Amino acid sequence: MLHVNENYSKIQASYLFTEIAHRVADHHAAHPDAKIIRLGIGDVTEPLAPAVVAAMHRAVDDEAARETFHGYGPEQGYAFLREAAAKADFADRGIDIAADEIFVSDGAKCDCGNIQELFGNDVRIAVGDPVYPVYVDTNVMAGRTGANAGGRYEGLRYLTCDASNGFVPSPKAAEGCDVVYLCYPNNPTGAVATKEQLQEWVDWANGSKALILFDAAYEAFIRTPGVPHSIYECEGARKCAIEFRSYSKTAGFTGVRCGYTVVPRGLVAYAADGSPVELRPLWTRRQTTKFNGASYLSQRGAEAIYTPEGRAQTKAAIDFYLENGRLMKEALAALGYTVTGGGDSPYLWVDVKGDSWEFFDRLLKEANVVTTPGAGFGRAGEGYIRISSFNSRENVLEAVKRMKGIL
């Protein structure tokens, strides 16, 4: 008899963004003439940078001639991109990360979900609450949790992130855990962690033989001096951390698909007998077995991000989104709402002092504005909504006007 993986049945009936899509579709069906402004899912809206577009056009031309054609590429990524990333993202910031410690992929979401395949099913996992759902759901699928009870899965350690701790939990809350997921600038709260806070986590992980999975997908939005762009800015992080990077929000690659993961040499987990096992060869094995590499076209586009023109153009796009966030944050603050995020993040985390799905429905039905209810990110997200800065200036200003009219 063919049996299914029953761990899938533990996952809550509807993935957050699927439920949002259903509600928006129902609203649109009832009001087909309504102009809906979507400030929910964090998809970018501005076009690719001209430098990226030009590089991808050249890459297409490469594929049109036998002499320059590229078929299967190296699973770890082309050297031209890995070397550019190692220099610009790490060496230029005084961080010791080599090109051969970088694994190019089709995006950070996939890597965040797939990395857990390297670990035994008995590892103890800690996640923030609220949390990016991928961290949780992929471990549920793998069988590391019990059932969902009251919005939390048995067997996972939830680290409450709220206003009392600035949405950055203390390592003390993760005592006894083997793996912890951290994301800063944070999705969904938009909060950032100081270097001192991240150093505490690194020191804890090294002292506990634990591993930090650090999601740095939004590091390019950081504008405050001194806020770390990488976990590897902390002393000892090479011994206890894997870092995920994304070009999706950095350069609008949500549809192009490209990112990378850093697995340093010498980073280890442990076998059942306590002997150390290096993780980099395991991730290499996983990728070469299950992944054929990001496309040549997308990697050439990503390489162009690191050119002087690409840097200036992608920074301008990010600054545009940050200005969107500033306009919305100021408007909501003037209406009496406490707002976290913005400034160093594309997300605003708004304290609505009530049921988050009810507030979501109110904005949708009365203002035709789509946001994301905080409850969808975990129990500690109840009472908040997440608003994305990814949209046109015209739509952002119109959304602000509408919200002012009903709030």
Image (spheres, rainbow, N blue to C red):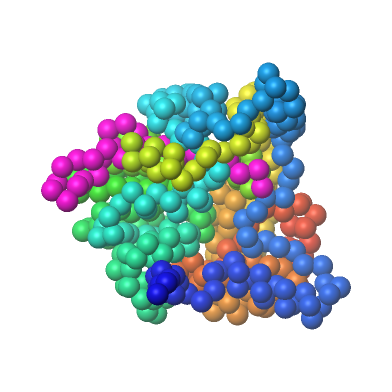
Work out whether residue 356 or residue 86 is closer to the camera in this orientation and state it: 86
Q: Is residue 165 visible?
A: no
Residue 310 percent coordinates (x, y): 66, 29
- Name the side, left or right, on which 263 lies relative to 21: left
Residue 178 percent coordinates (x, y): 25, 54
Residue 149 percent coordinates (x, y): 37, 79
Work out whether residue 70 or residue 38 is closer to the camera in this orientation and state it: 70
Examine the image and state in which quarter residue 172 appears.
Answer: bottom left
**Can you say whether 315 is above or below 400 in the image?**
above
Quadrant in which the C terminus appears: bottom right
Q: Which residue lies furthest to the top in this view?
A: 67
**Can you say whether 189 is above or below 276 in the image?**
below
Q: Which residue occupies 55% across, 31% down?
A: 73
Q: Which residue occupies 44% across, 39% down?
A: 288
Q: Which residue occupies 50% across, 31% down?
A: 74
Work out whether residue 200 or residue 156 is closer to the camera in this orientation and state it: 156
**Can you say whether 362 is above or below 210 in the image?**
below
Q: Is residue 293 visible?
A: yes
- Name the side, left or right, on which 361 lies relative to 139: right
Residue 198 percent coordinates (x, y): 35, 45
Residue 169 among magenta residues: no
Marker count (numbered): 0
- Name the side, left or right, on which 218 lies relative to 399: left
Residue 266 among magenta residues: yes
Examine the image and state in which quarter residue 314 appears.
Answer: top right
Magenta region:
255-280
Q: Which residue occupies 40% across, 75% down?
A: 1
